[in-house]
Image: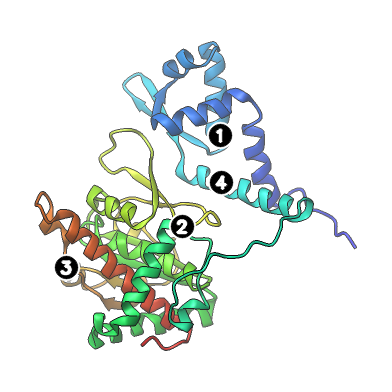
Amino acid sequence: MNLPVNLADPAIKRPAQIAKALAHPARIAILQTLARQNSCFCGDLTNILPLAQSTVSQHLKALKEAGLIRGQIDGVHTCYCLEPTGVAELKTLLLSLSEELTATCCETPDLQPELQPELHPNVQANLQPELQSNLQTYLQSMLQSIQINPDIISNTRKQDLLSVAAYIRDAIGKRGEAHLNFICTHNSRRSHLSQIWAAVAAYHYGLEGIHTYSGGTETTAFHPNAVDALRRAGFQISIVGLMGEPNPHYALEYTPNQPPMVCYSKRFDQAVPPGKPFAAIMTCSDADQNCPFVPTAEFRQSLPYDDPKQADGTAMETQVYDERCRQIASEMMWMMQAVTGSHPE
């Protein structure tokens, strides 16, 4: 029996609002232009589109009201750029509609998966084929390295990771969710890498309800060298926001089944949604020492990493950043495997 549909349901109203905002070719063209150029003034768009400036302004207003773009006053003019949260919503909506229509209207032939290298049985059973292909290859290579050399993570380090894993299991058991806030001084390198790889690891092992964040004791910027290391690992990354911002927002994609992660530098007390209990995971000794109390954190674990910043501008820069990226990825994967209940070797 078909149940009545509540048209006031936000799950229906919000997609309808987005769809209405896109119901004109000029608005699609505006979004495409902002995606390519990062930011534009209304006058720039008038030069591109065969429309009067007043008409372009109306289209910009509709997109802004739908939360798909934002504007920032630069002198007497407003500069427009994509709104990361709205763009993520749009992508999720399109993916959801595509999957539903494909499932009901289209038949696809069974495809034989390509043969993959042999992995540890516990890992093999949990592989998520929906990861970006380059990222999937990166993870498989890394997991094989851990299998061949399990001592790559020290026993002392494993105990720290198991403490976090136990917190995650306990939090999910109590509330159905766990919030992890990775904290370092500047929220520019190690805390971002930890947040991102923890999210990927949770997805890889099919763990739901795990939310990852990062923050600093001060705000700087997500460092480009750390961003480049993630690109080399297989992430698709783009800048979302006004061109030339001192603290740019980066959209990171690791699977077509999830909206991009939007990452930028922020204070640790601005990272987690208000009122949410969380674990404070300190990824540098400086933040651990200078931040003895983290309000609303119900659990705290020191998990420091060597700062790749020391290699900035040297011939070892790429190697050091790649090593730190791989180390953090390895440990987050090991930790999330422990959350599943299987005992990592």
Q: How many marks?
A: 4
> Does dot 3 land on a helix, a strand or a loop?
loop
Rendering colour mode: rainbow
Label 3 – label 1 distance at C-alpha:
44 Å
Q: Earlier in the sequence, mark 2 or mark 4?
A: 4
In percent of the image, x 31 and y 59: which residue is there?
192
Amino acid identity at mark 2: Ser
Q: Which residue bears the numbered disc 2?
A: 133
Return the disc, 1 or 2, that comes first in the chain's sequence: 1
Callout 3: few (<14), some (14-19), or many (20+) C-alpha neighbours within 10 Å? few
Cα–Cα span, label 4 and label 1: 18 Å
**145 relative to 88, above or below:** below
Q: Nearer the viewer, mark 3 or mark 1?
A: 3
User: Where residue 53 sits in the image (x, y, percent)?
Assistant: 51, 13
Label for residue 22? Answer: none
Q: Tell me the amino acid under the disc marked 4.
A: Lys
Q: Are marks 1 and 2 in contact (CB under 8 Å)?
A: no
Q: Which residue sits at x=42%, y=69%?
A: 201
Residue assigned mark 4: 91
Q: Is residue 65 left or right of residue 324?
A: right
Pointer 2: residues within 10 angstroms few (<14), some, or many (20+)?
A: some
At mark 2, the secondary structure is helix
Give the spatial CA distance, label 1 vs label 2.
36 Å
| Residue that carries the numbered disc 1 in the rendered image | 65
Residue 286 visible in the shown view: yes
Residue sitting at 53 percent across and 61 percent down?
Answer: 130
Which residue is disc 3 drawn over? Answer: 306
Query: Do residues under tags 4 and 3 come within 8 Å of each other at their CB atoms?
Result: no
Question: Which one is closest to the eye, mark 1 or mark 2?
Answer: 2
Q: Are marks 3 and 2 in contact (CB under 8 Å)?
A: no
**Along the line of sight, which residue is nearer the eye, 194 or 218?**
194
